[in-house]
Image: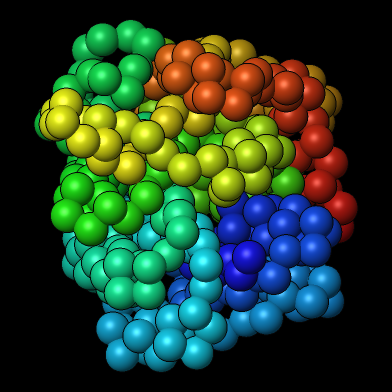
């Protein structure tokens, strides 16, 4: 089994690659190492992976010729596609970054998966696809045609393209709707990272929605566990066609427990023994009040039960943060 991981220097890509390398999988990684957030953090992740024998190539997935060459040379058996332009708020001012990476780049990857008869294509979707959906908790069978932002719209586009490829070419595809993944080596653009940094430095934190927001936080180890289990579990979903199987699946990957933003901040305060200076602000454009994952489907598939809640996970992140940033 040869696994190609895109976005390998990213948060999830880094942790997943370490997990698979330790299990002696043949892993090849690609990443464009862009400067959306601290490039030094990405470089540190990548150095660790290379020390653990990762084979790596720096490429941009929106460049079709470069993607074609990678597939021709490596001929992977499995592809785990994690590369994407992330961030809800960044998409408001930088829409073409999302079109190039999340739509053009996704198409370049999945077309090569078809061309090279990949055994299983696993890709990152997002809880953002639920958008303006009012049903709680979010379930995979809910209608997701009202994205609240461009990021969510690109992820929904990925799901539709993946299903069409499964239907047309019997390409096995599995989409994972991640719910606010956090943990050591996390992304500096995420709220938990910004809160920790600013509270430690005694700078004000921006609390949107006047603090009345809820998020379903998922610890990185739980995410890696799920992906590791799903690699060899091919999707079996009939879709809307009852006459034949269409090998496409979608799973929520969350903690199944929305946390109030104020409680989240309090855990950081208690762990750091510092008081947050809060600047309360209204909801930002494109944001939603609450995310809440129904995880019954992934539980039935692999007996997935989240092991780490924020009371345990946040202090582990803070310990890493203090160590990494001295």
Seen at 57% across and 48% down, the residue is 231
Q: Is residue 132 above or below residue 127?
A: above
Identify which residue, 17 or 69, lies in the foreground.
69
Q: Is residue 68 above or below residue 125?
A: below
> Residue farthest to the top?
136
Seen at 37% across and 60% down, the residue is 85
In percent of width and height, residue 298 lies at 51, 24
In percent of width and height, residue 200 lies at 74, 41
Q: Quadrant of residue 63?
A: bottom left
The C terminus: image quadrant: bottom right
The N terminus: image quadrant: bottom right
In percent of width and height, residue 157 lies at 19, 49
In the displayed structure image, the side of residue 281 where residue 80 appears, left or right: right
Q: Is residue 23 above or below residue 44?
A: above
Identify which residue, 149 or 116, lies in the foreground.
116
Note whether residue 49 is visible. yes
> Residue farthest to the front?
243
Seen at 80% across and 63% down, the residue is 24
Seen at 32% across and 41% down, the residue is 248
Coloration of the structure image: rainbow
Note whether residue 154 is visible. no
Identify which residue, 136 or 281, lies in the foreground.
136
In percent of width and height, residue 279 lies at 47, 29
In the displayed structure image, the side of residue 138 where residue 168 appears, left or right: left
Q: Quadrant of residue 240?
A: top left
Give the total of numbered labels. 0
């Amino acid at each position: 089994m040869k696994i190609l991981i895109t976005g390998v220097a990213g948060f999830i890509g880094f942790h997943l690659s370490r997990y698979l390398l330790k299990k002696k999988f043949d892993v090849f990684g690609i990443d464009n190492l862009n400067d959306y957030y601290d490039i030094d953090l990405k470089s540190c992740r990548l150095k660790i992976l290379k020390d653990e024998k990762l084979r790596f190539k720096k490429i941009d997935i929106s460049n079709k010729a470069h993607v074609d060459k990678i597939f021709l040379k490596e001929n992977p058996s499995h592809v785990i596609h994690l590369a994407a332009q992330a961030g809800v708020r960044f998409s408001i001012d930088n829409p073409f970054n999302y079109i190039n990476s999340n739509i053009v780049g996704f198409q370049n990857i999945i077309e090569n998966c078809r061309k090279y008869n990949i055994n299983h294509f696993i890709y990152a979707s997002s809880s953002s696809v639920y958008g303006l959906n009012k049903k709680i908790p979010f379930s995979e069978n809910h209608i997701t045609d009202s994205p609240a932002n461009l990021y969510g719209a690109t992820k929904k586009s990925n799901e539709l393209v993946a299903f069409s490829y499964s239907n047309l070419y019997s390409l096995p595809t599995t989409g994972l709707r991640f719910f606010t993944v956090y943990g050591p080596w996390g992304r500096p653009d995420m709220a938990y990272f910004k809160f920790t940094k600013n509270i430690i430095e005694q700078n004000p934190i921006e609390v949107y929605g006047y603090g009345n927001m809820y998020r379903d936080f998922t610890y990185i180890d739980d995410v890696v566990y799920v992906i590791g289990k799903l690699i060899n579990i091919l999707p079996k979903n009939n879709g809307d066609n009852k006459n034949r199987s269409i090998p496409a699946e979608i799973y929520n990957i969350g903690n199944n427990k929305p946390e109030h933003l104020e409680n989240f901040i309090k855990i950081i305060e208690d762990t750091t023994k510092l008081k947050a200076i809060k600047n309360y602000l209204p909801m930002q454009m494109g944001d939603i009040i609450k995310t809440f994952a129904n995880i019954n489907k992934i539980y039935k598939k692999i007996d997935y039960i989240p092991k780490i809640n924020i009371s345990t996970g946040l202090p582990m992140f803070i310990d890493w943060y203090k160590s990494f940033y001295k």
